[in-house]
Amino acid sequence: MTDTSTPPASESSAPAADAATSSVEEASTEAKKSETVASDSDLFRQSEIAADYVEGLLDILDYDGDIDELVSAGRPMVEVVGGRLQPLVGQRGATLEALQELTRLAIFRATGSPSRLLLDIGGYRATRRKELGAVARNAVEKVKEHGEAVRLEPMSAFERKCVHDVVNAIPGVQSESEGVEPNRRIVVRVAD
């Protein structure tokens, strides 16, 4: 009969094994760091592609605007500022949302990867975020006062996220989305 068991490791081989494990862990940490750097550079590359695309659209439409490309909160962003840009925002941001989707498609075509690009024109998103904060706080007050759920008007994904962020920061209430696009809305109710 043959003994197939592994002989016990000698004490002198343990430090070598620990060193090998430590080297593997260090290499893994370095790889993660380089992935983070690459991902940040990838995000900035996406914002550059988006800025070029938006600049081309502005040229075609004969609109003037300054374009800023940046990465914020792990998302590529492009901001267009200037006068006479309201037609590019549209009613309740509908045109802006469509332009954002077209710009995301341009990024996908160039990189082969989907993008979470956030496009803002004329400061619309910042202004709308403030308005939605007020809407959310008003809904929370009604829920706390009457104890009944409040259904808000249908909103875009960006608008719903703004409202969810405000409601989730207030204790005693919760929010959830219901319905199907384009009629998806938020319901604010007393927390369970």
Image (cartoon, rainbow, N blue to C red):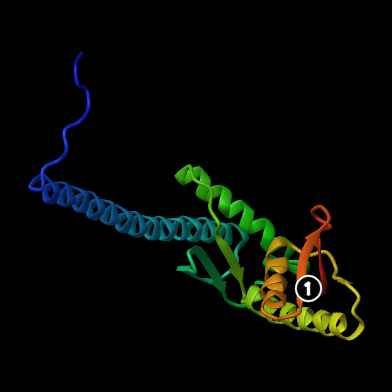
Where residue 123 sits: x, y (%)? Answer: 62, 77
Q: Residues within 10 Å of mark 1 (few under 14, many from 20)?
A: few
- The image shows residue 7, relative to residue 173, as above or below, that is above
Depth check, front residue: 47 or 156: 156
The quadrant in which the C terminus is found is bottom right
**Residue underneath mark 1:** 191
- The image shows residue 87, relative to residue 27, as above or below, that is below
- Numbered label tally: 1
Left or right of 100 in this view: 6? left
Where residue 75 sits: x, y (%)? Answer: 50, 63
Where residue 44 sits: x, y (%)? Answer: 41, 61
Depth check, front residue: 170 or 116: 170
User: Residue reaching furthest left?
Assistant: 12
- The image shows residue 34, relative to residue 12, as above or below, that is below
**Residue at 74 percent of width and 77 percent of height:** 132
User: Residue reaching furthest front?
Assistant: 1
**Residue at 16 percent of width and 38 percent of height:** 8
Depth check, front residue: 71 or 135: 135
User: Image quadrant of residue 153?
Assistant: bottom right
- The image shows residue 143, relative to residue 26, as above or below, that is below
**Residue at 67 percent of width and 63 percent of height:** 96
Where residue 101 sits: x, y (%)? Answer: 63, 53
Left or right of 50 in this view: 34? left
Left or right of 139 in this view: 64? left
User: Image quadrant of residue 191?
Assistant: bottom right
**Residue at 76 percent of width and 79 percent of height:** 172
Q: Amino acid at mark 1?
A: Ala
